Amino acid sequence: MKSQIPSIISNRTSLGVTASRVDLQLCQRLIKTCCPQLHIEDIIPNTEGLVYFIAEVNGEYIFRFPRFPESNKYLNIEAAILPKLGSWIELSIPKFEFICKKNPDYPWMFVGYPKIPGIPLTKTQLNTTDPYQSAKDLGLFLTQLHSFPVEQARQAKVPFLDSAQWRTIYEKFYQQIKTEIFPLLDSPLQTHLTSLFQKFLENDQNFHFQPTLIHRDLGEEHILWDPSAKRITGIIDWNDVSIGDPFFDFTGIFGSYGEKFTIQVAEHYPRLPDDTIFDRIRFYSKIGWCHFILYAEMIRDQKLREESIQQLQSAVIEKERKGAC
C-alpha cells in the first residue's frame, strides 16, 4: 500500500475540490517557456501523482506540476528546506535546478530536478536480496533526518506540530472519520475504529515525543533503490515534510514492507525508546486507509472507496483477531 494519502488530500477545507488540468502538452509548453536552455527531446509521464502531475524529460529530469492550490504552498516549502537538508543526509534527495513561479498559462509554481538513479523499492524486490543493507541505509537516513536542527526547518516555513498539536490533529481526524466515514461502515468496523482511536488518544505516552523534522510519506514509492548495487539511492517526494512525531516516519516502512523489516530498520536507529513504540506505528498504519476513503469520496471514486474500506477492515479487524495488535 501507499504509506499515506498526502495530508492536504484529506483536508477538504484547505484543498478544495478544483484541480488544475495538467497534461503533457501543457507541461512541454511550460518547460519550453520557463526553461529555454533545456532542449526537450522526449517527455513522458513519470507517475500518476495524487497532488502533482509528474513528467520525465529526456530521461534525465523530473518536473513536478501541482494539481491543487495547496500543493503549490508545500512545493515552496520543499524549495526552501531541501537545499539545507541535502548537505545533512547521505542519501540523494531532489535538488531543484529549475524553479518557475510565474507563467500566464499556469497559475502555480513548478520545479524540475535531475533524476535520481534507481527504481521504487517494492517488497518483492526487497525479498530478492538480503534486507540488512537496505535496513541499515534507512536507519541511517532516519537518524540523520530526525537530527536536523528544528529551528532551521522552522525558518524554512516547515509546518511545526508539538505533541499537544499532534494530539489535537488526531482528535479532529477522529471526529472527521465519525462524520464522513462511519456512515459508510458496518457497526463492527465502527466499534473497532472507535476502540483504536480511544486507546491511542487516551495514552499519554503516544504524545511524549520531541518533535523532529519528518518526511511524513516514506512508503515504497518514495524510496529509490539500485537493483545492481542492491542499495538505496535516494528519497523523493517531500510534499508532506513537517516537524512532528519522528516515529510517524516508520509508518510507510511498516505498511510497505511489514513488521519484521521495520524492526530491522529500528535496530539501526539509536533514537528508538523501546518496543512499545510499535503500537503507535501500527496505529498510524491502520488508520492510513481512512485517508484513502476520504480521498475516494472527494473524487467520487466508488471502486477506490470500496477497496479502501475492505483494506481498512482487514487492517483493523482481521489483524486484531490474529493478535497482531
Image (cartoon, rainbow, N blue to C red):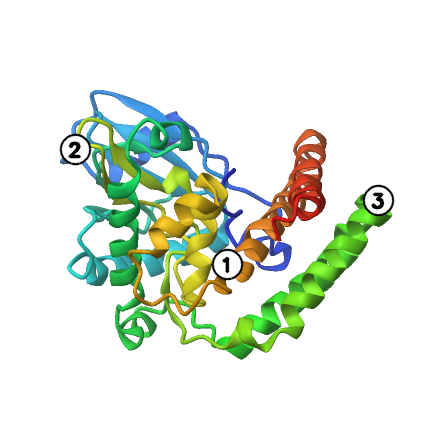
Q: Residue furthest front?
A: 323
**Which secondary structure lies at badge 2?**
loop
On screen, residue 185 versus residue 219, left or right, reads: right
Q: Is residue 29 visible?
A: no
> To which residue does mark 3 refer?
186
> To which residue does mark 2 refer?
38
Amino acid of disc 1: Phe
**Which secondary structure lies at badge 3?**
loop
Residue 14: quarter of image:
bottom right
Kindly identify the residue that appears in the image at 67 percent across and 39 percent down: 314
Amino acid of disc 3: Asp
Position in image of residue 179 (x %, y %): 78, 57
> To which residue does mark 1 refer?
278
Label 3: few (<14), some (14–19) or many (≥20) C-alpha neighbours in 10 Å: few
Q: Choose between 58 and 150: the one closer to the eye.
A: 150
Q: Nearer the viewer, mark 3 or mark 1?
A: 1
Q: Is residue 189 visible?
A: yes
Cα separation between marks 2 and 3: 54 Å
Label 1: few (<14), some (14–19) or many (≥20) C-alpha neighbours in 10 Å: some
Position in image of residue 191 (x %, y %): 80, 55
